[in-house]
Amino acid sequence: MTSPRITDPAAFIRANTRLRPVPLVPEISLHVADEAVPLWTKTEDELSESGLPPPFWAFAWAGGQALARYIIDHPTAAIDRDVLDLASGSGLVAIAAMMTGARSVVAADIDPFARAAIALNAEINGVAVTCELADLLSGDHSITAQTILAGDIFYERDTAERAFAFLARQAQRGATVLIGDPGRSYLPKDKLRQLADYRVPVTRELEDAEIKHTVVWTLA
């Protein structure tokens, strides 16, 4: 078996992405890829492994953009609070929370490349974010954050069900829960309350339109 060739994920990310401002949140710049499939294929080739998750960390998804914009424009959601960014991906929402004045931010994701991307993106934006490589939806973790942020996580049925159960538990213990979503199929709108909506510029590489109507929700 061929041994993995990616010994430095940060170097791999730098070599295969470009640093760009986020369209809806130009205060923040991220290392982003031009195309998803070539990067996905290259990652699998480099690691000699198939079936890897898509490189969610390499893009500013619509739900994350809207949620980051909301956090910056409504700082009371994060300021002086301990914040958890669930399924953080690029770290966009975590960075926005920290820039807004959060006391601390944990960016959680299950992809090791996301952890490297979050660290790179946080550094370039001049903030400190703690990266946690963990599946927090399992229910085996003790969560104490006062604000829970979830950008674009309701794209698949099983993940959506587990995510909502997790978020409902956090809301029940008193946490503020904010969700950014561009109309994914498995978002339980009947259990949510709308806070704001945005027209988010995105790439056609990822979405079915260049502008996605995206809503920030909280639990009803």
Image (spheres, rainbow, N blue to C red):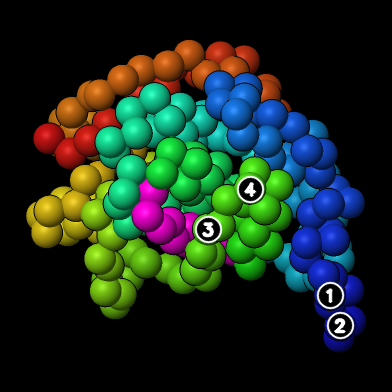
Task: Report the residue marked by disc 3.
Answer: 129
Write down the residue under mark 4.
126
Q: Pointer 1: what residue?
A: 7
**Spatial CA span between label 2 and label 4:** 35 Å
The kind of residue on which mark 4 rests is Gly
Which amino acid type corresponds to the residue marked 2 in the rendered image?
A: Ser
Residue sitting at x 19%, y 33%: 192
Q: Give the residue pinned by disc 2.
A: 3
Amino acid type at image mark 1? Thr
Three-letter amino acid code at disc 3? Val
Check the image and report above or below for 121 versus 61: below
Q: Residues within 10 Å of mark 3 (few under 14, many from 20)?
A: many
In this rendering, position of residue 198 left or right of residue 174: right
Name the dominant secondary structure of the magenta segment: strand
Q: Which residues are magenta?
A: 102-111
Q: Residues within 10 Å of mark 4 (few under 14, many from 20)?
A: few
